[in-house]
Image: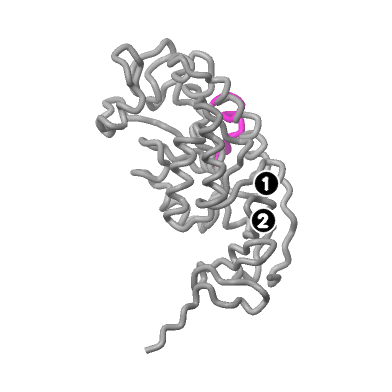
Amino acid sequence: MRVVLETYGDTGDGGVRLGGGAARWHLYDDHVHLTPHHTGGRLARFEAELLPFVEDLDACALAVIDMQNDFCSPGGWTDRSGLDHTACRAAVPGAVRAVEAARRHGMRVIWIYWHNRLDLRNLGAPTLWSFKHRTDQAGIGEELDRGRVLTEGSWGASLVDELAELVDADDIRVPKFRMNGFHGTQLDQVLRTQGVRTLFLAGVNVDQCVSTTMEDAYFRDYGAVLLADATATSSPAYCKDAVIFNAKQCWGFVTTTERFAAPDPYPAGAG
């Protein structure tokens, strides 16, 4: 029996199929079409690396990850741990621009954040060790001057002021309990029930919570787009460089908030 592979087949207009059925993408020399079967909707072409891509705005969402006081504010956990919280704050202006652009696009905004249980019984030793390497170091759930670290209802777990004022009642909120925004949460179900196929990502730390969420989105066959200037980390600069490299080579696409804010209209039915 001869097997006919739909994957890598000819699209009939100069492209190559990636995948099959309604979930396929079409690869062309100058862009990737993420929804080639679509005959309507609000198609837009976003400039990105390694190639521009086309997607329906109604199938996209913006995920803002961990833009919380414990990571980004003076007196928060990052600051009190001796790390550079101002490096994380560098993501704030870009995250604000991303949210404002998503609003203009009529795109869903999803706030993903650490909200741990008071009793910490959902956190195993490996996760606790990740953030407590010394006996005198404050770990998740331990007390600091402004309350317990990354604990639901605490100041540290709250969004930074600049973003808190942008939250809309219709936004989707997803608390998480690990770095990865999908692990043990309802994020996947929310995206699928809302018809989201492509996720734009902003937030901190780009080499930890943002990157693991982006990787898992990729593993689940979502389109994943890193907004480079809306992300930051308190880690050394090479950590973000590595994420950007892998994001565009492996996990999806990399773009900027300027490009995100101003995609080009794309005529339905075009290749």
Q: Type of residue at label 1?
A: Phe
Q: Dots 2 and 1: beta carbons under 8 Å?
A: no
The one nearer the camera, 95 or 251, is 251
* Residue 170 seen in this snapshot: no
Task: From the image, give the main secondary structure of the stretch colored magenta.
Answer: loop
Which one is earlier in the sequence, the residue at label 2 or at label 1? 2
Q: Residue at x 64, y 46 (%)?
A: 255
Disc 2 to disc 1, C-alpha distance? 11 Å
Mark 1 closeness class: few <14, some 14–19, many ≥20 residues within 10 Å: many
Q: Is residue 256 left or right of residue 139?
A: right
Q: Which residue is mark 2?
A: 52
Placement of the N terminus among the 4 image quadrants = bottom left
In magenta stretch: residue 172: no
Residue at the bottom extreme, as displayed: 1
Could you say where residue 177 lies in the image, as x and y percent from the top left?
Answer: 36, 35
Number of numbered tags placed on the structure image: 2
Rendered-image quadrant of the C terminus: bottom right
Boundaries of the magenta span: 160-171
Please state the horizontal and vertical placement of residue 186, each as a whole percent of the image.
39, 47
